[in-house]
Amino acid sequence: MHFVALSLTLRAAVDVDPEVLVGILWAHATSEDGLQHVRARAGPGRVDVAFFLTASTPTDAFGAARRLCQRAISASALLSGTEIRTFSGRDQEYEC
């Protein structure tokens, strides 16, 4: 299992509840994504997301997480305009 952390930068004036985002991600996950667990935490203008995925390599896991986020953004009006960024925060601790 691989850990991938991404930060979703939200468009101005949008406030997304982290649990709602987790639900959207699960709704758009496919078996090919290898998603096992996902957690989210809100920050100013963004939501940081921790993915735990089964994949052959860390690169494959990173790609799967990005594709899943892109599908969720494309399908959800709430996430329209959201940008995917590599997580750059110092605190990468997530409770599971």
Image (cartoon, rainbow, N blue to C red):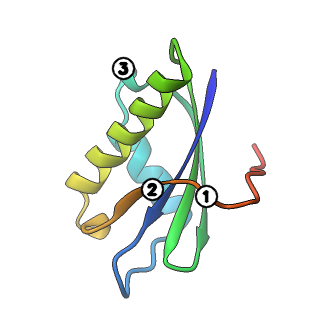
Residue bearing the label numbered 1? 88
Query: What residue lies at 37% left-to-right and 88% top-to-bottom?
Result: 13
Q: Is residue 78 left or right of residue 46?
A: left
Choose the circle earlier in sequence order: 2 or 3: 3
In percent of width and height, residue 56 lies at: 51, 11
Amino acid at pointer 2: Arg
In percent of width and height, residue 72 lies at: 31, 50
**Marking on residue 77:** none
Residue bearing the label numbered 2? 85
Query: What residue lies at 56% left-to-right and 52% top-to-bottom?
Result: 49
Point out the frontmost of discs 2 and 3: 2
Question: In the image, is residue 83 above or below residue 14?
Answer: above
Q: CA distance from mark 3 to mark 1?
A: 26 Å
Q: Quadrant of residue 4?
A: top right
Residue bearing the label numbered 3? 32
Q: Quadrant of residue 9?
A: bottom left
Around disc 3, counting alpha carbons within 10 Å, would you say few (fewer than 14), some (14 to 19), or many (20 or more)? few
**Would you say the residues marked 2 and 1 are in contact, meaning their CB atoms lie under 8 Å apart?**
yes
Judged from the image, the secondary structure of the residue bearing numbered disc 2 is strand
Amino acid at pointer 1: Ser
